[in-house]
Image (spheres, rainbow, N blue to C red):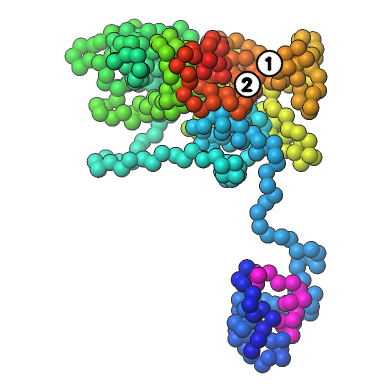
Amino acid sequence: MGTANEGKTGRELASYTPEQRREACEAWEKSGLTRAMFAKQWGVNPTTFYGWVRSYEEQGPKGLEPDGGGPRKRRGRKPWLPEPVKQEVVAVKRRFPTFGLQKIKDFVRRFAGLSVSTGSVRKVLRAEGIAATLPARRRRTRRKPVGPPQEFERAHPNDLWQSDITYVDVPWSRKPLYLVAFMDDRSRYVVSFGLHAHQKAEIVLEALADGISKYGRPKEVLTDQGRQYFAWRGKCDFQDRLKKEGIQHVVARAHHPQTVGKCERFWKTLQDELWSRVMLRDLDDARERLRHYVAHYNFQRPHQGIAGAAPADRFFGAEDAVRAAVERAVEKNALRLALGEAPRRPVFLVGQIDGQSVSVHGEGGKVVVQMPDGQRKEIDARDLGINKTKEHGDERDEEHGEQDGGSGGPDADAPAPHATRSVAPGVPGAEGDAAADQGAVGGGERGAAHARAQDGHGDPRDVAG
């Protein structure tokens, strides 16, 4: 027995018009077959065909129409991303080749005020022929684990600092450079660091003193049992210094680097995003590049371990305020995209002075200062010497032709104690403009051997020279 559906593929049979459904129900009534047999010959799922018959018997031909009798809703993929979102995703990936899908999503949200999912980021990169960075697979160890890994995080900044030492191989010396860093456990903020040609105990004492002078004393310091930090018999200089400062020393058990895992992960990030992408000229050049990168890491780089916030957000207690500012920017840009307008980059500066939150953001061509007591002060951009003109849809500086970004401040790598800046693109010292060929080390290629890192005052773009 021939049917109206012979020769059709499964994809073609996936949907039927109300007329085809009515035709099937009327043909079944005349066939004398059971519903199951007729559905098999017609090429329809028996359960689906039973629903057609029941609707036809109860409501007539109208029961076979889509709900409400209106046009049938089309199933399938959601509309493709707006072009500005795709361009921003590609620009961030080209600027930061090591960024994965989640980090690109967080960066675009924070500095461009655009919302995008990790799946959409993957599709955009695939369409552009750009390989996505996949998370590295963990090596399986033959040693039977004692138990599941125990994660910990202190409740407040300066409750605990972690410290560790690693080395960096350089082409001009047989011996490597030694890098020491102190990191706040709560925020992952690098409070101090040092790069040296030796690994004597003085390097950790110097870094500790630098961190205390900038941010005060932590309650505890966590280290491994390296000879610079710990002595089996008696006490070493580092332990004596902690005792004089009134700081509790927490020592990890031997051969267990996971205890200072936050520092270990920072070394991996530093290797992937800086050392492997530059050609270091000498010690001074290496220190300058490192200084720029730490400023980028502290103030700009979204950290997946703290829900996409930058370390400075948490360290200075501005995480909630920054998140609120980003959410407002995303909401406004979503409306602009829906109306077919060009999105705007968020302009905001959030900080804490003497325990009181202060925020600065752009609004309608004005700089709005929100004081701790609730007072709001608006300053016209022209009063600040900023003269803007519209050029091809972008705001340009008439004198220099630079893109409008935000407000200025002190150097990102040398913030004042108890003050932070979580900033939008263009803020001097913590730049966030996603230029396609610029980054913490520039363009994703190894820097030229003759190029020396310029003094960019914490601007990651200048690290490559």
Q: Which three-letter amino acid code belongs to the residue tagged 2?
A: Val
> Which residue is found at the position 79% from the left and 17% from the top?
388
* Total numbered circles: 2
Q: Secondary structure at mark 1?
A: loop
Residue at (46, 7) in percent of width and height: 213
The three-letter amino acid code for the residue at tag 1 is: Ser
Query: Where, by quadrant of the figure, is residue 381 drawn?
Result: top right
- Residue 420 relative to residue 193: left or right: right
Contact between marks 1 and 2 (CB within 8 A): the answer is yes
Q: Which mark is residue 423?
A: 2
Q: Which residue is mark 1?
A: 407
Q: Is residue 437 visible?
A: yes
* x and y percentages locating residue 230 in the rendered image: 26, 16
Circle 1 packing at 10 Å, graded few (<14), some (14-19), many (20+), is some
What span is in magenta?
12-26
Q: Nearer the viewer, residue 41 or 235?
A: 41
Q: Quadrant of the N terminus?
A: bottom right
The x and y percentages for residue 274 are: 45, 23
